[in-house]
Amino acid sequence: AQSVTQPDIHITVSEGASLELRCNYSYGATPYLFWYVQSPGQGLQLLLKYFSGDTLVQGIKGFEAEFKRSQSSFNLRKPSVHWSDAAEYFCAVGRGGTSYGKLTFGQGTILTVHP
Amino acid sequence: GAVVSQHPSWVICKSGTSVKIECRSLDFQATTMFWYRQFPKQSLMLMATSNEGSKATYEQGVEKDKFLINHASLTLSTLTVTSAHPEDSSFYICSTEGNSGNTIYFGEGSWLTVV
């Protein structure tokens, strides 16, 4: 069965600083990988996804993520964080094939942004 | 606009009563929908896979007789929490795979509070 680990429960950065959120997955085949963001009391918003092809994926709001098969990682990055980026971020892995929508989520990383 | 609509957004019910949450796909047919649950300060956990015209498939540890899933049409799946207890208070969110492939749509989510 697939699994996702987000090692950092809580990260604090200053506004304007760079950000990297870590995600490691366990899956036997090539995974479908996702990053979602959730603001307090809100639903999920997709930031980006990787299915195949270029391992550096660009997403919305200036985020990007890099799939590294050798490290089983899919870390999320942003060069300059804005105060509005404060939220909880979830990495997720989906099975390939006929049911890619069945996701396993990581524990989430709460991002706090200091002015 | 929303591709998947979930209703209600917020619901409060008394212990022992049942509450129904609806998940509708707008403008497309969803043969498969997924239901997730998120307890406060925790990650999202898949509860079940809802298949149009057949029985839902529940994840291990999820009581199928307590969480009734009905997917009677190609655009509607419902989750009924029966005999609700305070420990069922959670954020419930549905999702579906898009028809064009490699796209997952989440509903807005439903906050359930059992008092």
Image (cartoon, rainbow, N blue to C red):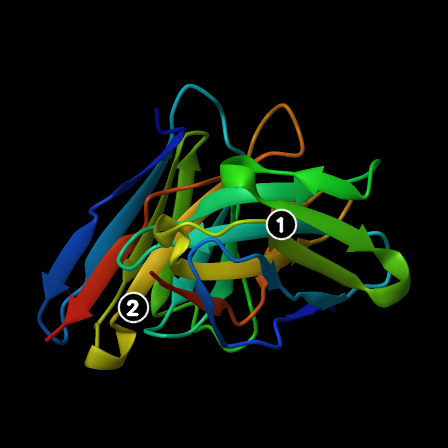
Q: Considering depth in this image, is B24 or A89 the residue closer to the camera?
A: A89
Numbered label tally: 2
- Taking A58 as reference, is A13 above or below it? below
In the picture as drawn, the residue positioned furthest to the right comes out as: A70
Q: Does the image show residue B32? A: no
Q: Quadrant of the C terminus of chain B?
A: bottom left
The amino acid type, in three-letter code, at marker 1 is Phe
Labelled disc at residue B90: 2
Q: Considering depth in this image, is B45 or A21 the residue closer to the camera?
A: A21
Q: In the rendered image, which residue does mark 1 sit on?
A: A34
Residue B63, by quadrant, is bottom left
In the picture as drawn, the residue positioned furthest to the top comes out as: B27
Residue located 24% across and 72% down the image: B89
Q: Quadrant of the N terminus of chain B?
A: top left
In the rendering, at what x and y percent does residue B37 appear? 40, 64
Foreground tag (2 vs 1): 1
Chain under numbered label 2? B
In the rendering, at what x and y percent does residue A71 appear? 85, 66
Relative to A56, is B1 on the left or the right?
left
Residue located 71% across and 40% down the image: A57
Asked whether the residues under marks 2 and 1 belong to the same chain, the reply is no
Q: Does the image show residue B49? A: yes
In the rendering, at what x and y percent does residue A18 appear? 57, 57
Relative to A68, is B113 on the left or the right?
left
What secondary structure is marked by label 2? strand
- Taking B4 as reference, is B109 above or below it? below
Residue located 13% across and 76% down the image: B15
The amino acid type, in three-letter code, at marker 2 is Ser
- CA gap, disc 2 and disc 1: 23 Å
Q: Considering depth in this image, is B21 or B98 the residue closer to the camera?
A: B98
